[in-house]
Image (cartoon, coloured by chain):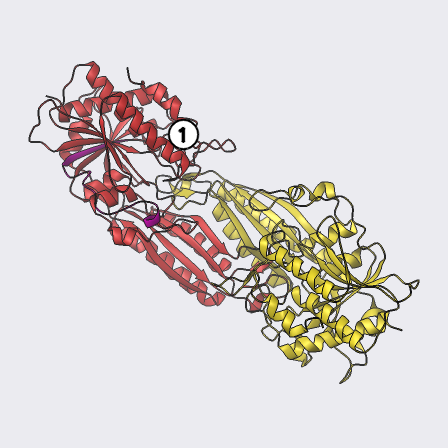
Chain colours: A yellow, B red
């Protein structure tokens, strides 16, 4: 008998976990994340599912129908990588729940009428190569290999030196994708619901701001003789926060790299990454433009320069109304609530490439995400498994 | 015949130099800096000088008098380590000039009446273990080994795992120290002088500011629900700049470390190092207190906390008037100008521990320091060698 939900969850708990913070470091193609990829293969084998892995490391475990139908495959799953010092649920909950949902359906004697796949996409968080949803973008051709192979991690290692690359046929017969994910916010707490259905994803993106000045001695250089890019950055970080508040959107500078990063040297360069999200493609573009304009004005006063590079921009996603309504209706206790999310997901990428997609959220009582404090109760997780089983049943069982 | 100044300089030029920036990475006890330590031994051997090395790695090459006198030793030299991405002259110029000055005196047939030592102190910049002038502080007992052994570098390696430690007798008979150094500023350019004499060193120090907040998702967390320490830091960096301008002092945040430093996560923690310097011990303390107060006020608004730790504080140094005057007077073309410096030096540490000390500066036409752009002309460097030879002659030759 394959491992149940709680056993799978307990097995994953120590992998890539920092003893100091309790958070997870599961960067793609490093040891902890590769251990999870091996675990994925073992779980598939224990269930007699065939694993297909593409040239980028994306994995799908296939549950084949008794007799092939004309319908394209139904995919579920999520990702196994984490942000730096992330939580336990973001990603793995969707993969573990998918295996558990297959088990639940089999216990009921269900037989699929179309292929059902459990997916694990690599580098969803972009924590190593800087491009969010990199695995699903590569598998769907949303980003070309010629461009992706040159992406580098913080140690200067290129993606092209890590994976073979080339073309992927992993998703070629996939018609529908349903991703279960821990909620990233507190909507479901306020609504008193264990499970919700996503209506769409806010547009979002990452912009690298490179502030350049002149390195100099922190003691002997008069304040008025400096060209200190740290000052330009500091004002820009405050401006981004203010612009986001004013427009009811989100703007964050969470990553900064300083050159040379010495206590007694005025920096020559500060690079900082803006994560911006909002209600519409236009309003996010306005937000970024306002921040860039204020950065440029301050650079003029500081004697520095600022260059802005869009590293990834994801337009607004509106999931298929009929699919969302079909997933949300008629559960124990009524309908599940529907809600939008400000977080990016592989489901958004697949939707953008023509695969009908939807998402289920499991309540997160802390409301905290991308942090060791992210959590979900076991009861809510099991409600999520049941929700996913029902969803697969509605979409892929006779 | 030992290598002349220009040959020594050319031999050092490639060691630890970054091909990308042209700057130097000569952190203590790493390969490049150890190569310089070995070079020091070779230069001493070529001159028949005996090298004494203490338990911390500080080196002195001794030129012994024909017959011992009652005078304590005269030390000259500087350091061979660099800041991250530093210039070629800061440190090595003083060591190379010291060897060249010994050669010049011997060519003139000079015989010392007291021991003359050429010194190379380790970790003057504090670029690895965070404590400036670490080698000279250890050699003079200004910092105890019990405290120093626990200092850690950015990789978590403790000083106690790198050097044996214990007690040093290297400086026990040293009465006087004269350090030659490239100027860190443009005073000598304005005065039209190749060489100057230091009158003293501004008080200065390093304070670590730890800003703590709550890690969270950069997309799904509303701006008003955040406790983002990056904002508190950004305001503090701007406040430090403003306070320094208002008080005519110096304040720099050149080093920042963000946790977890991911683009799509609000940071849980930002640590940043304030380098502050000014005209008096009291005015520097006032400057740091003002920055700390403003940081605390902003932390209250951001829902974050700030903790300030003094990592090193060096009080004002005023060199001996008579020694300064004796070094400055009666050179070709008149007296050398005298000037204070805002940069810390081993000479300041030795002065603080009762060794009569002074410094010579060689003109830096760029005025830039702690940067690959730091420079000096060969003619000025040779004038510096001559100045140092004259100084040794006046203090240690019959």
| SS at circle 1 | loop
Question: Is B124 contained in the magenta span?
Answer: no
The spot of residue A259 in percent (x, y) is 48, 42
Residue at the spot of label 1: B366
The residue depicted at 14 percent of the width and 19 percent of the height is B111
The spot of residue B116 in percent (x, y) is 18, 28
Return the residue found at the far right: A70
In the picture, the quarter occupied by the N terminus of chain A is bottom right
Give the left or right position of residue A19, taking residue B184 as reference.
right
User: Along the line of sight, which residue is nearer the eye, A386 or A181?
Assistant: A386
Question: Is B171 contained in the magenta span?
Answer: yes
Q: Mark 1 lies on which chain?
A: B
What segment is highlighted magenta in the picture? B159-180
The spot of residue A261 in percent (x, y) is 45, 45
Return the residue found at the far bottom: A333
Residue A236 in sight from this viewpoint: no
In the picture, the quarter occupied by the C terminus of chain A is bottom right
The spot of residue A359 in percent (x, y) is 75, 67
User: Which image quadrant is residue A189 in?
Assistant: bottom right
Q: Considering only vertical position in the picture, is B365 above or below B222?
A: above
Q: How crowded is mark 1: few (under 14 residues within 10 Å), some or many (20 or more)?
A: some
């Amino acid at each position: 008998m394959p491992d149940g939900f709680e056993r799978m969850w307990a097995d994953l708990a120590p992998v890539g976990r920092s003893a100091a913070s309790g958070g997870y470091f599961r960067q793609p193609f490093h040891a902890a994340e590769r251990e999870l990829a091996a675990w994925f293969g073992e779980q598939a084998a224990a269930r007699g599912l065939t694993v297909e892995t593409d040239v980028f490391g994306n994995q799908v475990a296939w549950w084949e129908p008794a007799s092939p139908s004309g319908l394209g495959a139904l995919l579920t799953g999520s990702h196994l990588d984490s942000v730096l010092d992330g939580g336990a649920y973001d990603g793995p909950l969707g993969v573990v729940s998918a295996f558990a949902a297959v088990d639940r359906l089999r216990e009921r004697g269900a037989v699929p009428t179309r292929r059902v796949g459990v997916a694990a996409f690599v580098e969803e968080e972009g924590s190593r190569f800087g491009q969010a949803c990199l695995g699903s973008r590569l598998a769907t051709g949303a980003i070309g290999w010629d461009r992706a192979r040159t992406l580098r991690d913080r140690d200067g290692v290129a993606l092209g030196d890590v994976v073979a690359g080339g073309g992927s046929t992993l998703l070629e017969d996939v018609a529908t994708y349903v991703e279960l994910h821990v909620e990233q916010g507190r909507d479901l707490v306020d609504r008193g619901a264990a499970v919700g259905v996503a209506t769409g994803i806010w547009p979002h993106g990452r912009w690298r701001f490179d502030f350049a000045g002149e390195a100099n001695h922190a003691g002997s250089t008069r304040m008025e003789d400096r060209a200190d890019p740290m000052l330009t950055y500091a004002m820009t970080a405050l401006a981004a926060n203010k612009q986001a508040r004013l427009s009811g959107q989100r703007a964050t500078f969470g990553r900064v790299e300083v050159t040379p990063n010495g206590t007694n040297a005025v920096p020559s360069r500060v690079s900082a990454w803006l994560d911006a999200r909002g209600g519409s493609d236009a309003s996010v573009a306005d937000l970024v433009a306002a921040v860039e304009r204020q950065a440029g004005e301050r650079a003029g006063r500081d004697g520095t320069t600022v260059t802005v590079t869009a590293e990834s921009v994801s337009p607004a996603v509106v999931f298929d109304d009929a699919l969302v309504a079909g997933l949300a209706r008629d559960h124990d206790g009524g309908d599940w609530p529907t809600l939008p999310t400000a977080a990016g997901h592989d489901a958004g990428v697949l939707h953008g490439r023509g695969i009908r997609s939807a998402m289920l959220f499991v309540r997160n009582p802390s409301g905290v995400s991308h942090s060791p404090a992210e959590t979900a109760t076991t009861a809510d997780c099991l409600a999520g498994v049941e929700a996913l089983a029902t969803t697969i049943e509605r979409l892929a069982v006779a």
